[in-house]
Amino acid sequence: MGMNMSEKILARHAGVESVKAGQLINCKLDMVLANDITAPPSIKKFEEIGRPVFDREKIALVPDHFQPAKDIKSAELGKAVRDFAHKWKIVNYFEQGRVGIEHVILPELGIVGPGMLTIGADSHTCTYGAVNGFATGVGSTDLGAAMATGEAWFKVPEAIKVNLTGRKPAGTNGKDVILTLIGMIGVDGALYKSLEFAGPGVKELTMTDRLTIANMAIEAGAKNGIFPFDEVTKEYVEGRVKKAYEPVAADEDAQYVQIVEINLDELKPVVAFPHLPGNTKAVADIEEPIAIDQVIIGSCTNGRLEDMEIAAEILKGHKVADHVRCIIIPGSPAIYKESMKRGYIDAFIDAGCAVSTPTCGPCLGGYMGIMAAGEKCVSTTNRNFRGRMGHVDSEVYLAGPHVAAASAILGRIATAEEVK
């Protein structure tokens, strides 16, 4: 019996020839990740074990959620991570000033790559499946043990094959793909399963599209999301990933518990209404105008250079609506610098946007864009649970950068086609 992509990576790291769904295995890890919220409790668990770190090059610590520190508690979290990183000489530690959003900078810097097995104390660690790796989120206790042992146990997930066909229409992006999928199967439709993307439509997706889609696999309940290795992947990882890597491909007789078909030709700009990512609707099908108060363009989901480019092209020459505040958050210092070189930052500021240093900030209701009661936000982030971005009576509508930028200009949920 053949194996799918996730099974091949897990088998390789367990040191066995094959694995099957439901099997419990112990695997050696290529990368262990934590941030300023999850690292401190992980560090406490690690210290209880009383061993040195297993490999200072295979741990990544990225203080991004509340950094630069928004208050004293945030500063103390950052200090705990900093002290630990300096004590153990952690190679992939990103100090304030060099900070970026973890799920943006790890692929950008080639810290994760094809065939690698990564765990992170953050649910959106599944982002790295975009580059043909197996990556998933874990709790702080498991992360603390992994920093000491370099190993973790897994229950091999069943897999859902998402077969993509057709071509992505103008004005749509990876966010529309994943929101459409979650709308089809629901927020628990892939519970503890692997979402494996396949089909001729994969080649139509940019790496930014893939990173966005893999990032939100968890919003369908998935253990991980993973893309095949192709020319797009190769072009992206070459020159970034310095270590030798071994891509994986699904066998023709690989087993899937479900096959979902998505024809990209039929893709439309969509939004996820409050208060679930699966509550999706095509913008064109919204019957009554929905006025908004805020727009967020950024996050580990849509804070990459291509997202900045899309937003800048729409906002250039226009003004943000008078009653709307628009906040732009590039995902890394490199993206920020390149956005400046290309004139995107000028376009944002000229349009009346606020441009932030790279941070998670408003995505988790941290800072830099908290909403009051009754306010509505169109956001390129990944979750719109009640109270996620501020008051429990505020509302978050998830969308891609096309819809977010257009909505900022028109003051209501809109598509890029509506901007004259």
Image (spheres, rainbow, N blue to C red):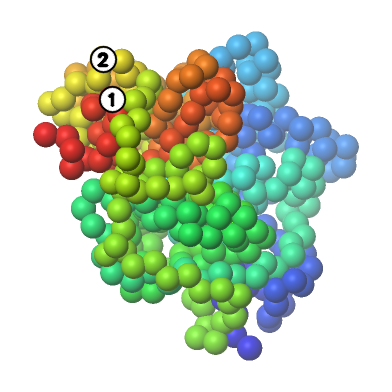
Tell me the amino acid under the disc marked 1. Answer: Gly
Q: Is residue 49 above or below residue 190?
A: above
Can you identify the residue that label 2 sits on?
Answer: 322
Q: Are marks 2 and 1 in contact (CB under 8 Å)?
A: yes
| Quadrant (top left, top right, bottom left, bottom right) of the C terminus | top left
Using residue 346 as the reference point, say whether residue 161 is left or right of it. Answer: right
State the image quarter where residue 139 is shown. Answer: top right
Tell which of 348 and 44 is nearer to you: 348
Spot occupied by residue 263 in the image (x, y as percentages of width and height): 34, 67
Mark found first going from the N terminus, 2 or 1: 2
Using residue 204 as the reference point, say whether residue 82 is left or right of it. Answer: right
Q: Secondary structure at mark 1?
A: loop
Graded by Cα atoms within 10 Å as few (under 14), some (14 to 19) or many (20 or more), the crowding at tag 2 reads: few
Q: Is residue 165 above or below residue 123?
A: below
Q: Is residue 202 above or below residue 110?
A: below
Tell which of 175 and 102 is nearer to you: 175
| Quadrant (top left, top right, bottom left, bottom right) of the N terminus | bottom right
> From mark 2 to mark 1, how far is it between C-alphas?
8 Å
Tell me the amino acid under the disc marked 2. Answer: Asp
Name, please, the residue furthest toward the top.
72
Spot occupied by residue 53 in the image (x, y as percentages of width and height): 74, 44
Q: Secondary structure at mark 2?
A: loop
Can you identify the residue that label 1 sits on?
Answer: 411
Spot occupied by residue 23 in the image (x, y as percentages of width and height): 76, 72
Q: Residue at x 50, y 36 (%)?
A: 274
Q: Is residue 96 above or below residue 418?
A: above
* Circle on res. 144: none
Q: Residue at x 60, y 61 (%)?
A: 190
State the image quarter where residue 33 is shown. Answer: top right
The tally of labels here is: 2
